[in-house]
Amino acid sequence: MTGNLLRAGDEIDAVVTMAKPFGLLVEADGGLTGLVRNANATVGATVRLRVVEYDAARSRFSATTVG
């Protein structure tokens, strides 16, 4: 997704950078950071996500896991 804006409904792959009790912090292509609430995965894992919301001004997104 480097150089492209994300839209709600887009499916992307991202790497888990932190796992917290409330969910996952992830990083997608181009260094975009995101939050996946109520999800579990190991730090360093690649997860498939569906974008819920994208904040272009802050270059961050929220998403849910796919599958």
Image: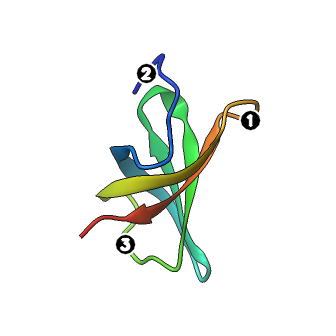
Look at label 2 and name its amino acid: Thr
Q: Is residue 10 left or right of residue 30?
A: left
Look at label 3 and name its amino acid: Ala
What color scheme is it?
rainbow
Residue 43 point in image, percent of width and height: 41, 63
The residue labelled by disc 1 is 58
Residue 8 point in image, percent of width and height: 50, 47
Give the quadrant of residue 16: bottom left
The residue labelled by disc 3 is 41
- Looking at the rendered structure, the secondary structure element under dot 2 is loop
- Give the number of the mark in front: 1 or 3: 1
Residue 29 point in image, percent of width and height: 41, 31
Q: Is residue 54 left or right of residue 8?
A: right
- Marks 1 and 3 sit apart, C-alpha to C-alpha, by 25 Å
- Marks 1 and 2 sit apart, C-alpha to C-alpha, by 15 Å
- Marks 3 and 2 sit apart, C-alpha to C-alpha, by 24 Å
Q: Is tag 1's residue or tag 2's residue first in the polypeptide sequence?
A: 2
- Whether 2 is drawn above or below 53: the answer is above
Residue 4 point in image, percent of width and height: 47, 21
Q: Is tag 1's residue or tag 3's residue first in the polypeptide sequence?
A: 3
Look at label 1 and name its amino acid: Arg
Q: Residue at x 60, y 83 (%)?
A: 21
Mark 3 residue crowding within 10 angstroms, few (<14) / some (14–19) / many (20+): some
- Looking at the rendered structure, the secondary structure element under dot 3 is loop
- Whether 58 is drawn above or below 44: the answer is above
Q: Is tag 3's residue or tag 2's residue first in the polypeptide sequence?
A: 2
Q: Residue at x 39, y 27 (%)?
A: 1
Residue furthest right as drawn: 57
**Mark 3 touches mark 2? (CB < 8 Å):** no
The residue labelled by disc 2 is 2
